């Protein structure tokens, strides 16, 4: 009788999922970097609470979007809120999966950074498919490239003045062997605070609700913060 009650409570806690495995996309990175490993750990914790397996694929922004629209992947793990304009049918999880500051990176400190508008006089390089860039830098002088590495090369060679990205991504690239002698540095203060959300494909509303419930749970019980320290994703 007690076992039956426990099973019933467990069943009611999270809805029955339509799929055995949920496939998520994360933008760029590789299985060796901290961003990917943090995302995988977070998904593992969430999946365990949803009683479902999760798979994480690292993809360029435009490739991830194309696969998401085609149904080849079930969810985009971390996109800014305005991503919904590109994929109106997507279901956004209300709780941010991550919040991180965005900084400007340059070869010198001779720039004044006070929000997005302060960037107007400068030539900016950005990665194709990054929605925050399309939203906030649409009227700026932009160069579009295919990866963070190429963007930092533009700064290093003087082809652009600034590159805007999160500190955690910049750390990964600038600590690589290619950039070990680079003069590129982070400018302060930050340009803005970016909140990223998980988007599920149309038809996966139950999964989206269960995902949000599990995400809130690991944030409230401290597991989310512990994972940041475990993977050493610090010093934004």
Image: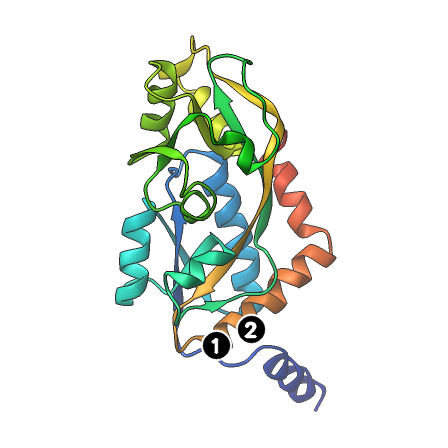
Residue marked by disc 1: 205
Q: Is residue 155 left or right of residue 116?
A: left
The image quarter in which residue 90 lies: bottom left
Residue pointed to by mark 2: 209
Q: Nearer the viewer, residue 161 or 230?
A: 161
Compared to 182, does 192 lie above or below?
below
Residue 158 visible in the snapshot: yes
Compared to 203, does 58 lie above or below?
A: above
Residue 167 visible in the current orientation: no
Q: Residue at x 49, y 39 (%)?
A: 35
**Residue 6 place in picture, x, y as percent:** 68, 82
Q: Position of residue 93 (x, y in %)?
A: 54, 65
Residue at the location (46% across, 77% down)?
17
Please tell me how crowded label 2 is: few (under 14), some (14-19), or many (20+) other residues with Cα within 10 Å.
some
Q: Which mark is residue 27?
A: none
Q: How is the image coloured?
A: rainbow
Is label 1 in a helix, a strand or a loop?
A: helix
Going 41% across and 79% down the picture, which residue do you hit? Answer: 18
Q: Residue at x 40, y 46 (%)?
A: 134
Q: Are marks 2 and 1 in contact (CB under 8 Å)?
A: yes
Q: Quick one: label 1, few (<14), some, or many (20+) residues within 10 Å? A: some
* Position of 27 relative to 231 (above/below): below
Q: Secondary structure at mark 2?
A: helix
């Amino acid at each position: 009788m007690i076992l039956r009650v426990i099973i019933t409570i467990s069943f009611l806690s999270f809805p029955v999922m339509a799929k055995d495995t949920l496939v998520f996309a994360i933008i760029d990175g590789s299985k060796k970097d901290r961003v990917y490993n943090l995302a995988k750990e977070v998904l593992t914790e969430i999946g365990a609470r949803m009683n479902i397996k999760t798979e994480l694929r690292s993809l360029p922004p435009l490739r991830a979007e194309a696969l998401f629209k085609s149904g080849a992947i079930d969810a985009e793990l971390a996109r800014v809120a305005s991503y919904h304009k590109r994929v109106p049918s997507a279901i956004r999880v209300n709780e941010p999966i991550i919040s991180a500051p965005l900084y400007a990176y340059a070869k010198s400190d001779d720039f004044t950074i006070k929000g997005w508008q302060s960037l107007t006089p400068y030539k900016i390089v950005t990665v194709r498919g990054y929605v925050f860039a399309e939203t906030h830098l649409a009227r700026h002088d932009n160069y579009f490239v295919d990866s963070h590495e190429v963007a930092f090369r533009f700064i290093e060679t003087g082809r652009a003045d600034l590159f805007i990205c999160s500190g955690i991504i910049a750390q990964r690239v600038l600590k690589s062997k290619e950039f070990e002698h680079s003069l590129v540095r982070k400018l302060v203060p930050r340009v803005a605070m970016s909140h990223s959300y998980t988007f599920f494909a149309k038809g996966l509303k139950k999964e989206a609700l269960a995902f949000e419930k599990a995400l809130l749970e690991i944030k409230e019980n401290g597991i989310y913060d512990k994972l940041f320290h475990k993977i050493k994703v610090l010093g934004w």
